Amino acid sequence: MIIENIQMKIDLTKATFIIPLRIESPDRMRNIITILCFLLDNFDTKIIVKEVDKTSIFRENVLPQLKEYFDDMSNLTHIFEESEDSVFYRMHILNEMLSLSKSDVVINYDCDVLLPIDSYVNAYESIINGESDVVYPFGNGNYQKQIFSNDELVSDFLSNDFDFSILEKKSNISTSDFGWVQFFNRQVYIDGGMENENFRGSSPEDKERFFRFATLGYNVNRVNNYIYHLEHSRGQNSWPVSCQGNPYMQDNIYLWEKIQTMNREQLKSYYSSQDYLKKYK
């Protein structure tokens, strides 16, 4: 099955999507294939995928399938780091990709989500035009569409011009808040402390990130549209914060409680003194 690029791709050339990845299940592999097909087909943009695992499932199983769709994947960079660590160190991985990206806009992007086309465009243009420093391209509330996909549903979606009504055949409405995807002015992302590497594994870092950039006085906005979450089985690194599969969970919760007490000046002081930032200067 080949997706033909008949229409011109949408210009997001001043943006880089950074996608941390560990493929823990067949459905997560299907999800990363789906979102990369969508992004590569619709946008002229840069994508960095950093996979940290014991072996590269992406290189062995994902790239061959992508090559069936695309002759040119020069905008996609895949980095593999071998690791035996059972905890997926998402914040550190994001910071490494952030330090590699040179574009004006950097998009912290989860491997299981899709957005309507106009959500990407509106978020991107809001930052390029100086209207926002950070954009959450989905509403806060009942703006999540949980997609319970299978191979047949995804195949229909890919072969029918990415028609979201196909995904909606197997969907539920649920709540959304602070995770999944954020569009950043790259320099703001860096000046605001990047990702807090003191959080490890599954943690409240999504809530902390929103709190931090809003409290620091940056212009944080939303695109009030739906986000489509491609559901997947849950491993140690993808449980909600309330679950205790992460050995660092209690430390993460203590840190989040501490940060919530800080005002703008205290946050500035805290982030100016973090040792992890020295690696990226």
Image (cartoon, grey):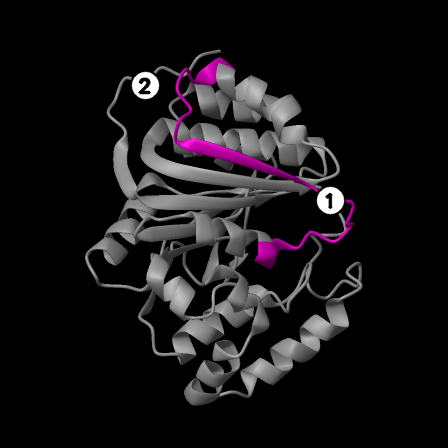
Q: Residue 126 location in percent, x, y?
A: 25, 56
134 is higher (above) or lower (below) than 3: below
Task: Answer with left or right where residue 165 lies relative to residue 92.
Answer: left
Q: Distance from label 1 to label 2 (Cα)?
A: 37 Å
Q: Residue 235 location in percent, x, y?
A: 75, 47
230 is higher (above) or lower (below) than 190: above
- At horizontal 42% and vertical 24% (from top left) the residue drawn is 73
Location of mark 1 (residue): 83
Residue 229's disc number: none
* Amino acid type shown at disc 1: Ser
Task: Answer with left or right where residue 260 lies relative to residue 54.
Answer: left
Location of mark 2 (residue): 5
Q: Residue 109 location in percent, x, y?
A: 48, 48
Report the span colored magenta.
68-92
Q: Quadrant of the C terminus?
A: bottom left
- Foreground pick, 160 / 98: 98
- At horizontal 69% and vertical 74% (from top left) the residue drawn is 253
